[in-house]
Image: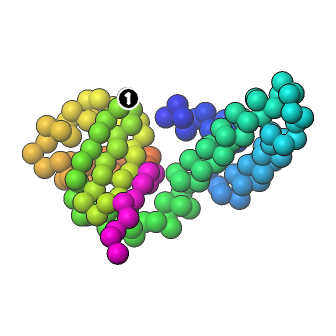
Amino acid sequence: MKRISEYKKLFGVETNIELKPLKKAYRNLVKEWHPDKFQAGDALQEEAEIQSRRIIDGYHFLVSIAPETIEANAGQYTQSINSGIADFHHKGMLLEITFVDGGTYEYFGVTKPTYIKMINSNKVNRFAKRSIYPNYTFRMSKREQEAV
């Protein structure tokens, strides 16, 4: 959740993430902090490189959790959660679930007590369908490539 609020603050996003204003803010920030804008040896050049990486990461992260992106990938997400859980990891407030179909999703804000309830459940996927999937912000983190 800290990561989400940090990136929202960087791009000036209040509550809902809309792609058009986000893209405009991204372009303006990239113009302002592009490393090529500064001379070699300039003290701001190193800071600009760090800032530009942060801006790019933040943009891709916010796009991945935007309602428009989630809506566009809803069919694939539904297929993944219905395929069953292959593996899961919890670290801090982040729960990463890998599904049988190869998709891996990150769920933000999942507390330790909720995670403990999930692992103690006799039907983990059923618990997740009721308590995790509908209640937490998520994004696809990776998808395994199928062999051709």
Viewport quadrant of the C terminus: bottom left
Q: Is residue 146 magenta?
A: yes
Residue 37, horizontal then vertical, whole percent: 88, 41
Residue 12 seen in this snapshot: no
Name the residue rendered at 27%, 35% in the picture: 114
Please state if 24 lies on the left or on the right of 97 as rendered. Answer: right
Name the residue rendered at 72%, 40% in the picture: 52
Question: Looking at the image, which residue sits at the far front?
Answer: 40
Please state if 6 lies on the left or on the right of 117 as rendered. Answer: right
Question: Looking at the image, which residue sits at the far right?
Answer: 39
Name the residue rendered at 56%, 47% in the picture: 61
Front residue (pair 62, 17): 62
The image quarter containing residue 5 is top right
Name the residue rendered at 36%, 53% in the picture: 104
Please state if 57 lies on the left or on the right of 139 as rendered. Answer: right
Question: What residue range appears in magenta?
Answer: 139-148
Question: Looking at the image, which residue sits at the far top?
Answer: 43
Say which residue label 1 marks: 92
Residue 12, horizontal then vertical, whole percent: 71, 40
Q: Is residue 50 magenta?
A: no
Q: How many marks?
A: 1
Question: Looking at the image, which residue sits at the far bottom?
Answer: 148
Front residue (pair 86, 2): 86
Residue 103 seen in this snapshot: yes
The image quarter containing residue 103 is bottom left
